[in-house]
Image: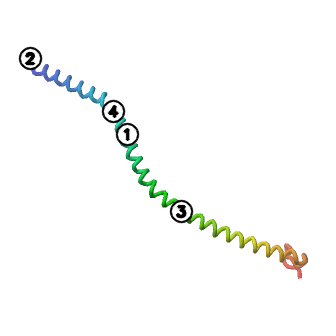
Amino acid sequence: MDPYAEAGMIFAVVMTVIIGGFIVTFPILRRLGRVMEETIRDRQEARLGRGNAAMLEGEIEQIKHAVGRIEGHLELLGERQDFVENLLSHRDPKQLPNREGWEG
């Protein structure tokens, strides 16, 4: 038999096996890759989830503290505004400034 004919047949068989193997194994390997990615992602989320819970609790406490301080400042501001309004309500309107300045 001609050596070129044998080489051609061997090449055709090898290419058929390679292409067929690719067609058969590609969907399986693609699915396996997705499963591995999901597994890694789940492990990372579980690992970060434990650390994040403690970190989030600390941040929540800081926010509660900041809100408490703001409430205190608002209460003081309200008291000061009430005091100023009380003082202004007892003044004579002639003593209040007009557009040009103070009336004397």
Query: Which of the two marks, 3 or 2, is nearer to us in this view?
Result: 3
Q: Alpha-carbon distance for marks 1 and 4?
A: 11 Å
Between label 2 and label 4, give the one nearer the viewer.
4
Q: Label 1 belongs to which residue?
A: 35
Q: Secondary structure at mark 2?
A: loop
Image marks 1 and 4: residues in contact by CB distance under 8 Å: no
Q: Secondary structure at mark 3?
A: helix
Residue at 36 percent of width and 35 percent of height: 31
Earlier-in-chain disc, 3 versus 1: 1
| Disc 3 residue type (three-letter) | Glu
Q: Which residue is mark 2?
A: 1
Q: Earlier in the sequence, mark 2 or mark 4?
A: 2
Circle nearer the N terminus (1, 4): 4
At label 4, the amino acid type is Ile
What is the distance, in whole Å, between disc 3 and disc 4 at their CAs?
Answer: 45 Å
- Say whether disc 1 or disc 2 marks the residue closer to the N-terminus: 2
Q: Earlier in the sequence, mark 3 or mark 4?
A: 4
Task: In the rendered view, tell whether residue 54 sits above or below residue 97.
Answer: above
Disc 1, SS: helix
Q: Residue at x 13, y 21 (%)?
A: 6
Which label's residue is closer to the chain start, 3 or 2?
Answer: 2
Q: Which mark is residue 28?
A: 4
Residue at image coords 41%, 47%: 42
Cα distance in 3D space between marks 1 and 2: 50 Å
Q: On the rendered structure, is 100 left or right of 39?
A: right
Name the residue carrying label 3. 59
Please provide percent x and percent y for residue 36.
Answer: 36, 42
Instruction: Indicate the quadrant containing the N terminus: top left, top right, bottom left or bottom right.
Output: top left
Q: Looking at the picture, tell me which residue is in the foreground, 13 or 7.
A: 13
